[in-house]
Amino acid sequence: MAESVVRALYGRSTSLTLSSKKLKEVPESVSMLTELTVLLLNNNSISCLPAELLSLQHLSELNLGNNALEEVPAVLGHLESLKKLYLFRNQIRAVPPEVIGGLKNLVVLNLNHNQIQGLPAEMKSLSRLEHLSVLDNKLEVVPAEVGHLTRLTVINLTSNNLSQLPQQLSSCKELTKLHVARNELTSLPEGIGSLSKLQVLDVAGNKLSMFPVGFHRLHLKELYFEGNRFVCCEPMPSVQVVETLTLKELAARFVLQEDRNRSSLVHKMLPLYPDLTTMLASSSCCAICLSPFLTTWLECVHFVSLKKDMRMRYSQTIPVRALLCSYRCFNKDGHYYFGVAPK
């Protein structure tokens, strides 16, 4: 092992492999290799890193997978050149905010097979991150700040304890693969339908009852959804109800409709009322008449053929959520939207 370091030192090497050397600590002499760009320390018994590694300011790839780390070493937060960081198969329980906040150039972060319960809000600093993998941990919440990571192409959160995903996930427009199998998810973010580059989605082994509005417009190539609690299409009698809209709802529908006309006075004046704009941001569009409305009047489901409607190779049919603005639309003939009856 010492010979490897010496050879690297005298050869001015930019990479050093100390994998599977039964190391319990990193040799201090490694800090003398100031030109290192790649350092592989995986498959050892390392429990901490020496502060002297601060000298490795050119390091772009560090593999500490399959070691004995109980926390993310503080020194990593000062290695700003890091682009790839592998910390899989350790005993890490938390990701310190001050460490993650210093890794602004990180492109790949692998935290698989640890005991991590949460990710800090400071992860929004990882503006260059493209690949985030936290498979097989104890995550209960994904922070809303994930929406700041607009370069993400792959997210793997399989085998955690997540009951929901943040709505801000819809801001990750470059996302091509999303793996969230074997969690406790009861729904997916409504905005997921806007992820136009998403090709692979794995939601198997959750508690989903249906997919969100607009899901069938995605251009998926692979979809894994077995082991959920999807609603079934069972005929049930419908009771026609005459709805009475509140004054707030009537006013909101008028403003939303007028806002669609870019030459209208409402459209021009709306930016002057930020509170109103914020309230109207949660509006929806009727699946039948396409009119805007503020409050979900009727939640429905329609059944989408993966092969026919989404042009996938699968022959299954999936339930997709739909929202209607009124019972008047619901009772129209010629549509295939079904009301969801509570059990």
Image (cartoon, rainbow, N blue to C red):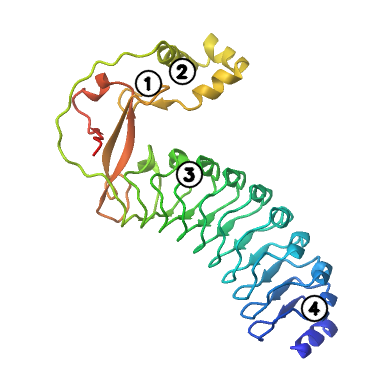
Which residue is disc 1 drawn over?
Answer: 291
Q: Which mark is residue 195?
A: 3
Q: CA distance from mark 3 to mark 1?
A: 23 Å
Say if residue 321 shows up in the picture.
yes
Hey, what amino acid is under mark 2? Leu
In depth, the one of 311 and 201 nearer the eye is 201
Q: CA distance from mark 1 to mark 2?
A: 9 Å
132 lies above or below 269: below
Horizontally, residue 171 falls left or right of residue 323, namely right
Residue at (41, 10) in percent of width and height: 247
Earlier in the chain: of badge 3 and badge 1, it is: 3
Label 1 element class: loop
Hey, what amino acid is under mark 4? Val
Hey, what amino acid is under mark 3? Leu
Label 4 element class: helix
Which residue is disc 2 drawn over?
Answer: 256
179 lies above or below 262: below
Which residue is disc 4 drawn over?
Answer: 30
Label 3 element class: loop
Q: CA distance from mark 2 to mark 4?
A: 63 Å
| Residue 49 drawn at (x, y percent) | 74, 72
Q: CA distance from mark 4 to mark 1?
A: 65 Å
208 lies above or below 67: above
Hey, what amino acid is under mark 1? Ser
Earlier in the chain: of badge 1 and badge 2, it is: 2
